[in-house]
Amino acid sequence: MVEEKKLTGPDFKAGIEFSTLIENQPFLGHYEGEAVALVRQGEEVFAIAATCTHYGGPLAEGLVVGGTLRCPWHHARFNLGTGEAVGAPALNPVSCFSVQRTGNKVAITGKKEANFHEACKNPSSVVIIGAGAAGAACADMLRTKGYSGPITLVGEEQPSPVDRPNLSKDYLAGSAPEEWIPLRTPDYYHSIRVDFVAGNPAVRLHPDEHKIDLRDGRTLSYGALLLATGAEPRSLPIPGAGKPHVFRLRTLADSKAIIAKAQQARNCVVIGSSFIGLEVAASLRNRGLEVTVISQDSSPLVKVLGDEVGRAVQKLHEQHGVRFLLDTTPQAILDDKVEIGAGKSVAADLVVLGVGVSPRISLAEEAGIKVDNGVVVDEMLRTSAPDVFAAGDLARYPEPISGERARIEHWVLAERHGQAVARSMLGIGGPFRQAPFFWSQHYDVVISYVGHAAQWDGCQIQGDLNKLDACAVYRRKNRVIAVATVGRDRLSLEVEAAMEAGHTSDLESILRAAGRKL
């Protein structure tokens, strides 16, 4: 998804004046045909590739936090000195370069060799159940840090882990080719010595024996185990919910099936005004279908973003031709319509359900592992069973921003969980303290959200939502617990950094300053 961009700024091979650089402010230039950012910290200068390996974001427009450079688009994090992708959604590193300073002049002299290994303990073997965001990120991080033991990655979905957010966005809309969708390939796992088992899910866990049974009768032993089975899309308890033209969206196969049906359909009904539901609505409008969203809610996304932001999102979709039936409960799905009661119906030869998901906890529950609206884990993401960890959509963990235990269904968080579990397994990790983050795309408008607000006392809007230049600040007990932004990428990064640092006064100052600018 990285588009070739024209190089700008000075040639760092020729060098620039040291005094040109401002502390912790990336300075964009290039070296041997590659965009590079220089970052000054005290008397030291770092040189790091300026294109994010996730979706090609402009790292020089990002934020320096400690020893990391963070992407403004989706908050990927890279080590300034090594280029390691230390925080998802980027899994691949960026290049780093050697810098020489002569007097007041600094210049790049060459590219550094990448080596991210650390001295760590080595479990006898690692088994990862679930090849989604958390599982894939864990496998990668284990090898990145130098673990040399056996790794087995067990996934239901074939052929390999996919970039799930794209399934409801660009890929479904027809603007992203399928070759962009694999997160990792079977060949990749072969290259890093990971035994990837697809289509043969785990069916029974024996924590006392450190073993797990697969559906085909195979038994795997483990020294450390990650449960990353994710969540299952819900259906609806109404007549017709199982009809062949009714779809849920979770896998690449689901997205392909919706695309195939959309090529024959004219009218689509999306049931549920969730992020997935609305992204599907936008994607199918892009394909030319007539789309109606039916929701029991009074406004889209009201439970996550509040009424004012929800109404702004609704208006955006209506401007693109989406019709909304809110405060409405579907009664039945027929072959060509959805009945909504009182003798009314909506034409539909394609129906997509976006009514939430349920965590896949049965494997843990049957093994006697503690569950409570998810698999309960501590701050190191360890479950109640020895050497068993849980991550992603099924993990209920101590969320540091809200101060409450939470189960959060965010793609980036799941990947970061997986990376953190790998470090914990190797004895080089610490308590998970990263702020939850997600983004949602509606046509060409992106909403970024940092923090976690299951409930809030008040929502303050700064700026103008209609002009797509605003932020929404969610407070509970007079404390900021989440911030949503539109058109304010750097603000989102600054909020994330202040939340993770626990600097309440800094966070309030950042938001006050942003309010004056908006």
Image: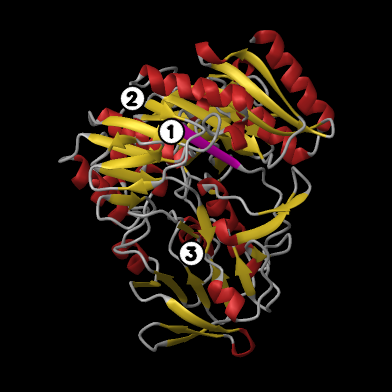
Instruction: Name the residue nearer the viewer: 43 or 160.
Output: 160
Instruction: Name the residue nearer the viewer: 147 or 357.
Output: 357
Q: Are marks 2 and 1 in contact (CB under 8 Å)?
A: yes
CA distance separating discs 3 and 1: 24 Å
Instruction: Name the residue nearer the viewer: 294 or 2.
Output: 294
State which tag comes first along the sequence, 2 or 3: 2
Give above or below for 130 relative to 331: below
Q: Circle 3: is it few (<14), some (14-19), or many (20+) Cα within 10 Å?
A: many
Q: Position of residue 51 (x, y in %)?
A: 43, 33
Question: As shown in the figure, which amino acid type bears the numbered disc 1?
Answer: Thr
Residue at the (55%, 53%) spot, across then down: 414
Residue at the (45%, 77%) spot, across then down: 202
Q: Position of residue 447 (x, y in %)?
A: 52, 29
Query: What secondary structure characterizes most of the magenta part?
Result: strand
Quadrant where the N terminus is found in the figure: top left
Q: Is 439 contained in the magenta span?
A: yes
Give above or below for 292 relative to 316: below
Instruction: Name the residue nearer the viewer: 109 or 119.
Output: 119
Q: Circle 1: is it few (<14), some (14-19), or many (20+) Cα within 10 Å?
A: many
Q: Position of residue 421 (x, y in %)?
A: 61, 63
CA distance separating discs 2 and 1: 10 Å
Q: Which mark is residue 139?
A: 3
Q: Position of residue 215 (x, y in %)?
A: 39, 82
Disc 1 is placed on an element classified as loop
Question: As shown in the figure, which amino acid type bears the numbered disc 3?
Answer: Ala
Q: Which residue is mark 2?
A: 5
Q: Which mark is residue 394?
A: none
CA distance separating discs 2 and 3: 32 Å
Q: Which residue is mark 1?
A: 51
Q: Is 239 contained in the magenta span?
A: no
Q: Circle 2: is it few (<14), some (14-19), or many (20+) Cα within 10 Å?
A: few
State which tag comes first along the sequence, 2 or 1: 2
